[in-house]
Image: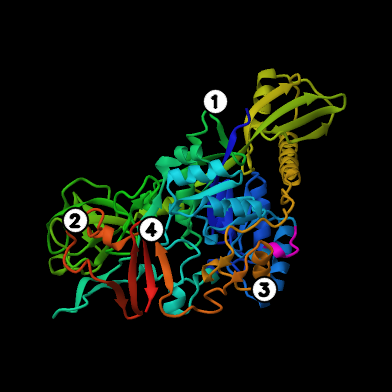
Amino acid sequence: MIPQRLELLSPAKNKEFGMAAISHGADAVYIGADRFGARSAAGNPVSEIEELAAYAHLYKAKVYIALNTILFDNELADARKLIDRLWNAGADALIIQDMGLLEMDLPPIPLFASTQANNQTVARVQFLEASGFERVILARELGIREIEEISQSTTVALEAFVHGALCACYSGQCYFSAVIGNRSANRGECGQPCRLPWNLISQADQGVEKERVLEQERHLLSLKDMNRSDHLGRLAAAGITSFKIEGRLKDLAYVKNITAFYRQKLDSLMTVGSVYGPASSGRTTFSFVPDPLKTFNRGETDYFLFGRKGKIHSFDTPKSLGEKIGQVDHIDTRYLTLKISHDIQNGDGLCYMDQGGRLQGFQVNSTNQGKIYPSGRLNLKKSPLFPGALIYRNHDHLFLKKLGGDSAQRRIGLDLSFHETAEGFVLKGQDEDENRAEVRLDMEKIFAQNEPAALATLNKQFGKLGASIFYLRQLTLHSKPYFIPTRDLNQIRRALLERMTLKRSEAYEQAPAIPRPLPAPYPETQVDFTANVANEKAIQFYRKRGVTRVDAAFEVSPPGPGTVVMTLRHCIRQALGACPKETKTPPVGWDAPLFLENKKGRFQLVFDCKRCQMKILTL
């Protein structure tokens, strides 16, 4: 039985990050080109993408291009030229949301439907499959049952996020940043209003007190980070074949650490006899113990995978807290102690929430017999620190130092055999993907006077694969012991490794896209601004599929007051204990109209309890 290939997909801010992700076990990386990516701050020249692709393909790993913004008419020609260059540079697929691209004459590059395409329902995924997409990246909000239903109703490959930052809104449906700062999320310029502090206002229709501030200066739309590492087997069984790590704007330590962590998790599913197998080649070893709490995280949630349970929000701060260390036991002028033992080191960064709900922090200067001394002249007794405060470490100095160097090695299994020929000798190699090469050594054959020493020399010199991409799986000697100078053995070994590397590079072939199918009917006859149609090609796409009315994208023609700028599965009422389904007597003020307000503006909250959704509207 052919195993189901499971792909670990990691973010690449640039070429360096992408190569590190591959070295730490990624089966594929996704990266932005210099334009049209949903992370405008993470663009890259095509020349560097070409270098990354060449490196990735040595391991049969893939490179996907996030070209997932909506496009204006004056950008289509440039996008077409860029896609040509990316295909010629070795890119394996495009991640897109603009349907106008399907009406263009593109090179045969496979198309993946970005999560920005709002992939929430069976009908939507069926339509995308019928339109020629070879993979659909599902909405983060979907639970395991919804994923199973989509998988059972389609044959398209399915990708799901398993780790990283969470947008509060359904992807592709957020216009909040465009409203308050003229920075469109669908154009790669999101200003992250969901990480800002907001006041929650209750507005009564009558009475003396017309408005009540229910929450003040809290990050009411900020969510914890996703961590589904304990549920990869369940996701695979539900039909997910690509497991995606968020983070094209995260630092290199995060990419290395989280990729390594999920590599080990996925490998544990691929034991002997398993129905699953890796999507690329090689074996990865690490010089550190991966731990997701030691690089950027806001706390962890599986985010509706098994329903609405636990706290998914991070209302006190949108910043990284790190790993919980312990509670403050004693505070002196210059040091503090904790109630439990710890491994805090000089240079660590510690943080805590003060009694006013504000994040505070300091760097550790030194430790001595359980006493922690902050750097600088901080007087702890005059600081906001208090006994009982929870201390977190958001900068692990020694851990990050390990990640700053060569923290992983990825090697391809190689079998070597050494043979005697009429003219001399030949060294043959075959790697784990059955690529083959050989190097001949023509020379006079002289029997070794010390046969054990000659055999030991062969084993030693052919075992030195050094900084190559290979590790030795097996060495077979089909030759009598001869005297062969060490320099000759080293020469043919190096030559063989070079030829094997070239063979791997030449053996990789980009898989072309499937033939584009005829237009399939769209499930509806009208699409509003949330379809994100910003160019004539996208209008043609929907017209050909039976849509009679196509509204312009928000970025082209903002609809005006009363517009839904966010649709969320996250619910502020539920998070703060005022859900009508969960409590018969909501707290005072919660049954009146509710509004979010800060210096950016005032917005109304509307609750769809039947669908268990919350919407944010302009006034």
Residue density around tag 3, few if under 14, some if 14–19, many if 20 or more, within 10 Å: some
Rendered location of residue 396, percent (x, y): 35, 54
Compared with 524, 503 (above or below) is above
* Sequence-first tag of 2 and 3: 3
Dot 2 and dot 3 residues touching (CB under 8 Å): no
Labelled disc at residue 536: 3
Residue at 29 percent across and 50 percent down: it is 310
Residue density around tag 2, few if under 14, some if 14–19, many if 20 or more, within 10 Å: few
* Sequence-first tag of 1 and 4: 1
**Residue 49 lies in what quarter of the image?**
bottom right
Magenta highlight range = 102-107
Badge 1 element: loop
- Asked if residue 245 can be seen in this view, the reply is yes
* Sequence-first tag of 1 and 2: 1
**Given the image, on which type of amino acid does mark 2 rest?**
Lys
Does residue 498 appear to the left or right of 468 in the view shown?
right
Nearer to us: label 2 or label 4: 2
Q: Nearer the viewer, residue 296 or 407?
A: 296
Rendered location of residue 548, percent (x, y): 62, 68
Compared with 337, 615 (above or below) is below
What residue is disc 1 on? 273
Q: Please, what is the dominant secondary structure of the magenta stretch?
A: loop
| The magenta stretch spans residue 103 | yes
